Image: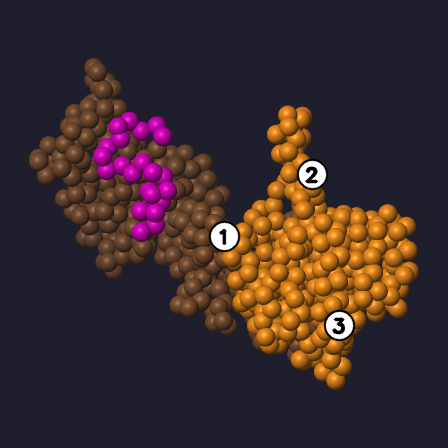
């Protein structure tokens, strides 16, 4: 029994939950009457009422009594009416009846560390990810997050909130020296200090052999800061790069033709027929069979993608509906791309998102809250969107990508020195 | 054209009172085997006479209560949720019930073994609502689970009198919006829930409730009960039903009667989803004959 004497001295408490058609069946008032007539008192912690006649309702009730004995007696009585202790009950699960969909009433995950109670044992949920279900394997005593599209009929999924506990993430990044960013979107903070903190974190990761994931958009190339990212890769500060077709296409365009979207990066001049360059770059990669093949045969000799291949940085290119080409390495099946990302984010402890809204949100959705995220974008709404979608651990830095990356490279040199 | 009523029964070949799991049962008061078989066959004949198709389950030695097929499971469209019996004496029935439904065109769903649920004995539709008896046999959690599985509104009713240990011994839906009940079998919350939820409630007297008036089989407008329920029969006639009595004294000795001896496989008359399905059948028929298209009713999920 986990009831603790908290609050009023001498009072014992336990939180129970009751679900179903508890309003129309008068089960909720019956339980509340049972509590008071047995000498206890209650506090309704939360009630959600079904919207239609078919929808179940749910209530969390804190039951209090003057002694453990009275509390136990009340809990035993109301258990017969369906009130189960949130702390002591096992999680409930239901078999999935079809592929690709959870059973009704499934527990929807957060990105925070979660445990479920199986056969009386609190069991850590593996591969923590938001917006998933929790599949349990009683025989193995295991629980793991599974996205909706990967549900297979016959798997057992946790339903309801009983027997589930979530451990709110401590402000991970603050503990690592990000205290200055006490507002999540840092629009009016000195960028130099922020950049220095990111440098310290990346240096720490490299020192402790922890993995850093960079999620980058094509603006990295358009703004002429591709070389800064190349320096980070060469320096061993990046282990994974997630991007779309565009970053790689423009990076290769720049390597082959010196332009990005037809603009000469060294001079800012618009090159005649330059708008064709990225298509010609993609076409050449497709003719050669891919970026790796282009590096192998000496066709591609510089740029972000070249450095990734030279320095064994794992890269993943996820496609979108507007892509030209795309490049042969681009994964065009969105669900397949998600699955690949899931595989590759294991062990990542820091993620730097630079100048991409959609890829940042996509990766943010997959990362557990324990992974520190810094999102750099010229547009504050990118960071706000990330936080609104649950990646609350994200620290935002609103700035142009080029000065940020230039400062980061310089700071890293200083840190190392 | 309404579908032919389809009922599951199990001959009382091995029926007897071999244990005591409700106040009706006494090993000292055994049923007369021959008379029991006769009473069962008469009920069977009445149901066939009402136009019902009867499927038979093979009786198993050592499982005397298999004769009470109402407790095999709860049928919802082509889905059956198997019973999980509270008493070990009946738990052996589970495997046979699973095989029977599994070998036919049913999707079989099982609840965890520790989640007691006694099928159509405790879960009865009246209109779109599933009324679910709990505490004496089925437990509240099982009804919550069943409601989740079939996505319907389920109202739990606490049963407070051990003589009325299953909901179908004290509550009998007759058609959507009309049911019979014995109030004293429920606590005051349950009585309020029924009074608020069912438009027309026929109150059965204590005397006739004891004669298992509420444990009636409904086929169309015909309502078949154990004999000894004359007042209830008058009430049924007043409401446009056609009551029939047949002696079932030997089954009362084990705490069952007409309804307990049957499981409606195509849905009880009072079930809202059955009315929808019948409407759907009619709709298909009318489309085949070129009649005007009617709106398609909601179909069961499974």
Residue nearest the viewer, comparing B184 with B63: B63
Residue placed under numbered mark 1 in the picture: A97
Q: Which residues are magenta?
A: A321-343
x and y, in percent, of residue A72 in the image: 66, 76
**Marks 1 and 3, Cα distance to the nearest angstrom?**
45 Å
**Marks 2 and 3, Cα distance to the nearest angstrom?**
38 Å
Q: Earlier in the sequence, mark 2 or mark 3?
A: 2
Q: Residue at x 61, y 73 (%)?
A: B63
Residue placed under numbered mark 2 in the picture: B1
The residue sitting at the left extreme is: A298
Query: In front of the other: label 2 or label 3?
Result: 3
The numbered mark 3 sits on a residue in which chain?
B
Depicted A79 relative to depicted B301: above or below: below
Label 3: which secondary element = helix
Q: Is residue A328 magenta?
A: yes
Where's the N terminus of chain B, which quadrant? top right
Q: In the rendered image of this protein, which colour is used for chain B?
A: orange
Residue placed under numbered mark 3 in the picture: B35
Residue nearest the viewer, comparing A152 with A11: A152
**Marks 1 and 2, Cα distance to the nearest angstrom?**
32 Å
Depicted A83 relative to depicted A241: above or below: below
The residue sitting at the top extreme is: A272
């Amino acid at each position: 029994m986990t009831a603790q004497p908290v609050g009023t001295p001498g009072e014992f408490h336990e939180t129970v939950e009751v679900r179903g058609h508890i309003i129309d069946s008068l089960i909720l008032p019956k339980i509340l009457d049972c509590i008071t007539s047995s000498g206890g008192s209650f506090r309704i912690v939360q009630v959600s009422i079904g919207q239609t006649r078919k929808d179940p309702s749910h209530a969390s009730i804190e039951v209090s009594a003057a002694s453990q004995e009275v509390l136990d007696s009340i809990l035993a009585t109301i258990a017969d009416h369906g009130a189960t202790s949130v702390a002591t009950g096992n999680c409930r699960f239901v078999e999935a009846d079809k592929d690709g969909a959870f059973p009704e009433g499934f527990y929807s995950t957060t990105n925070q560390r979660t445990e479920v109670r199986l056969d009386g044992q609190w069991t850590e949920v593996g591969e923590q990810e938001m917006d998933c279900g929790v599949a349990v394997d009683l025989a193995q005593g295991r629980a793991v997050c599974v996205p909706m599209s990967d549900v297979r009929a016959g798997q057992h999924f946790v339903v309801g909130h009983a027997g589930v506990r979530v451990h709110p993430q401590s402000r991970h990044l603050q503990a690592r020296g990000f205290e200055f960013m006490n507002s999540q979107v840092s629009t009016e903070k000195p960028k130099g200090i922020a950049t220095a903190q990111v440098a310290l974190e990346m240096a720490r990761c490299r020192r402790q052999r922890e993995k850093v994931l960079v999620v980058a958009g094509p603006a990295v190339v358009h703004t002429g800061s591709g070389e800064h990212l190349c320096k980070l890769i060469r320096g061993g500060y990046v282990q994974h790069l997630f991007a779309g077709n565009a970053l790689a296409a423009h990076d290769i365009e720049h390597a082959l033709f010196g332009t990005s979207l037809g603009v000469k990066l060294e001079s800012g001049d618009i090159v005649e027929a330059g708008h064709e360059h990225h298509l010609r770059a993609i076409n050449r990669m497709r003719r050669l069979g891919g970026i790796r093949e282009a590096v192998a045969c000496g066709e591609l000799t510089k740029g972000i993608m070249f450095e990734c291949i030279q320095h064994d940085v794992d890269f993943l290119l996820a496609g979108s509906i507007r892509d030209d080409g795309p490049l042969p390495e681009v994964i065009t099946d969105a669900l397949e791309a998600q699955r690949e990302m899931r595989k590759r984010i294991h062990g990542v402890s820091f993620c730097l998102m630079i100048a991409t809204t959609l890829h940042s949100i996509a990766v943010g959705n997959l990362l557990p809250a324990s992974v520190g995220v810094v999102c750099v974008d010229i547009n504050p709404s990118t960071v706000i969107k990330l936080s609104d979608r649950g990646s609350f651990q994200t620290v935002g830095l609103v700035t142009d990508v080029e000065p940020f990356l230039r400062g980061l490279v310089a700071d890293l040199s200083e840190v190392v020195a | 054209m309404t579908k032919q009523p389809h009922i599951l029964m199990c001959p009382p070949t091995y029926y007897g009172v071999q244990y005591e799991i409700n106040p009706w049962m006494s090993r000292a008061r055994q049923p007369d085997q021959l008379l029991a078989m006769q009473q069962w066959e008469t009920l069977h004949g009445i149901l066939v006479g009402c136009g019902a198709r009867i499927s038979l389950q093979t009786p198993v030695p050592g499982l005397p209560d298999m004769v009470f097929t109402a407790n095999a499971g709860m049928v919802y469209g082509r889905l059956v949720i198997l019973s999980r019996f509270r008493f070990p004496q009946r738990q052996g029935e589970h495997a046979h019930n699973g095989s029977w439904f599994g070998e036919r065109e049913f999707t079989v769903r099982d609840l965890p073994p520790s989640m007691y649920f006694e099928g159509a004995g405790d879960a009865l539709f009246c209109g779109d609502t599933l009324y679910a008896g709990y505490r004496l046999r089925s437990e509240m959690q099982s009804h919550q689970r069943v409601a989740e599985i079939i996505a319907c509104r389920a109202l739990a009713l606490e049963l407070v009198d051990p003589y009325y240990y299953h909901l179908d011994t004290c509550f009998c839906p007759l058609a959507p919006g009309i049911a019979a009940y014995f109030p004293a079998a429920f606590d005051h919350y349950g009585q309020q829930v029924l009074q608020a939820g069912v438009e027309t409630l026929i109150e059965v007297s204590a005397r006739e409730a004891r004669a298992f008036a509420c444990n009636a089989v409904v086929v169309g407008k015909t309502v078949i009960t154990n004999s000894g329920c004359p007042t209830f029969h008058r009430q049924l006639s007043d409401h446009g039903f056609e009551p029939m009595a047949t002696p079932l004294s030997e089954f009362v000795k084990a705490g069952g009667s007409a309804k307990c001896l049957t499981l409606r496989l195509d849905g009880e008359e009072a079930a809202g989803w059955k009315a929808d399905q019948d409407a759907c059948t009619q709709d298909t028929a009318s489309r085949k004959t070129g009649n005007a298209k009617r709106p398609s009713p909601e179909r069961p999920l499974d």
